[in-house]
Image: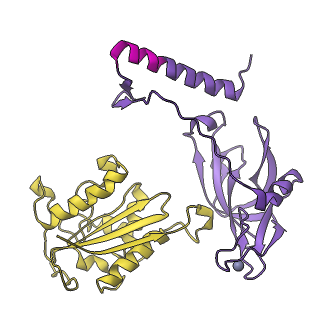
Amino acid sequence: MVMSLEARYEEFWRQSIKQLNEVVKATGLPIAPDEKGQYSLWYDVREMRLRFSISVERIKRFFEGLREGKVYATRCRRCGRYYFPPQADCPYCKASDMDWVEVSGEGELLTYTVINTKPLTYSHYPDYVVAIARMREGFNVLAWLRVDDPKRVRVGMRVRLQVVRREPEGYLTYEFVPVEQ
Amino acid sequence: MWIRSVGVATGTANLSKRPDFIGLDAAYQAAEQAFKRIGIEHKDTWKYFDVADVHDCFTIAEVMAYEDLGFVERGMGIQLVRNEQTYKGGLIPVNLDGGLKAKGHPIGATGTSMAVEMTKQLRQGVEPRDRQADIYTGWALAHNVGGTGHYAYVTIYSLDKDGSPRVKPKR
Ligand SMILES: [Zn+2]
């Protein structure tokens, strides 16, 4: 049986807490060595759960766009500056006078890094490439670059920004893909 | 020991909003403020300071710091290291305490340790003695960075309460 992601994280935490409880029972204190066994760490006996919730009311057009397979930026009507990820306010004009514009998607790779050491909730993904590309419109976008072989990634290569479904979670996001020359 | 100048600046946390990746604008701006207050130009600044601590949270960050602080011009930071000019006895001795990676970068304590180190250096009280910088002008600089490089602090210390820094003697 394949365990769901949530169940895997829960199992990880359950095991950690179980071990910690055993340490407290045996030694009287929640102190245990770190992962490498080098340093003693104090583990708080109370758990804090945190999941952020952020208002997207003023930029919800962006998320509607993802559902339509489109990536939107905002552009200030007064100064012409692009904002991506989209912002509802222009800090230069101190105004909220924005147009929603679909991003051309055509970009050139400026820089990238291959992530092979991942936090727990990213640990189920194969190594992934985080990249920044300069879009034709003149602003930059940071996104994952979908490639089979990270060794073939080159600064200056042409990429296209597209809406994808990130699996196995199944949520909509945007990624770069190389443009075949 | 006098804190003669402090420069503080912020920049964008989002790397995609930076015009380039070869320096930290927050650090450059913090340095600009700090130098302005003591009346020196943001150029060839190595010549005013006996010693400096810079925020080498990563290897490249140290080289970018040399350039953001104006020790040398953009692109020349690596030459300072290659020519051992950031060593004791060099043009500008940097991180004689080993720097962040050597001290385990204990975050907040890193900044405090820079203040302690610059004070010890200028008072010529560093132990062991083989990492005591030669003190000529009595001025030192600490450069501290936070976040993804979107906060920066440049603090300038001096043994003198008044006046601008002198230029170090030629050796
Ligand atoms: Zn504007």
Compared with B71, B64 (above or below) is above
Residue B128 x %, y %: 11, 52
- Total residue callouts: 0
On screen, residue B8 versus residue A114, left or right, reads: left
Q: Which chain is purple?
A: A
On screen, residue A63 versus residue B139, left or right, reads: right
Dominant SS type (magenta):
helix
Q: Residue furthest right?
A: A68
Image-quadrant location for residue A41: top left
Residue B26 x %, y %: 47, 70
Q: Colour of chain B?
A: yellow
Color style of the picture: by chain
Image-quadrant location for residue B70: bottom left
Image-quadrant location for residue A171: top right
Which region shows up in magenta? A19-28
- The foreground one among A57 and A176 is A57
